[in-house]
Amino acid sequence: MSEQQANNPLHGLTLEKIVITLVEHYGWDELGKRINVRCFTHDPSVKSSLKFLRKTPWARDKVEGLYLATQKSVWVKK
């Protein structure tokens, strides 16, 4: 199992940390444009986003994908 986790770039990250990082990088408006879900576009908060994303696998997949793409682009720029 540790082999699988070693290859998982999200290992050790909480969903909360991912959402906070994306909000710090993009802001709520841009995040809502990139991933059009109500928890990002209407009265957004980390708490409401986490509640929604934990219950909605397709939305969580999009958030994790955006996080990975963002980290990759930030890493390439360095």
Image (tube, rainbow, N blue to C red):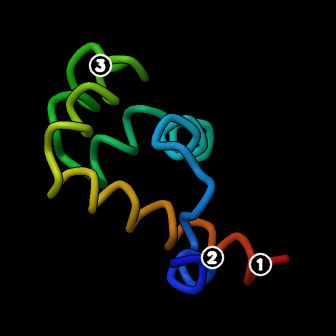
Look at label 1 and name its amino acid: Lys
From the top left corner, tell me how far across and down residue 39 is, in percent. 23, 28
- Amino acid type assigned to the residue bearing label 2 in the image: Ser
Amino acid type at image mark 3:
Ser
Residue 45's tag is none
The numbered disc on residue 48 is 3
The C terminus - image quarter: bottom right
Q: CA distance from mark 3 to mark 2?
A: 27 Å
Q: Give x and y (percent) for residue 27.
A: 50, 35
Give the labeled residue for mark 1.
Answer: 77
Q: Residue at x 54, y 64 (%)?
A: 10
Give the numbered dot on residue 73.
2
Q: Quadrant of residue 29?
A: top left
Between 58 and 4, the residue placed more toward the observer is 4
Q: What's the distance in space between the residues labelled 1 and 2, CA to CA?
A: 6 Å
Q: Residue at x 41, y 63 (%)?
A: 66
Q: Identify the element where label 2 is drawn.
A: helix
Q: Pick the residue in front: 13 or 73.
A: 13
Distance in Å between CA atoms under marks 3 and 1: 32 Å
Which residue ends up furthest to the front in the rendered image?
1
Vertical placement of 71 versus 35: above or below? below
Cβ–Cβ below 8 Å for labels 3 and 1? no
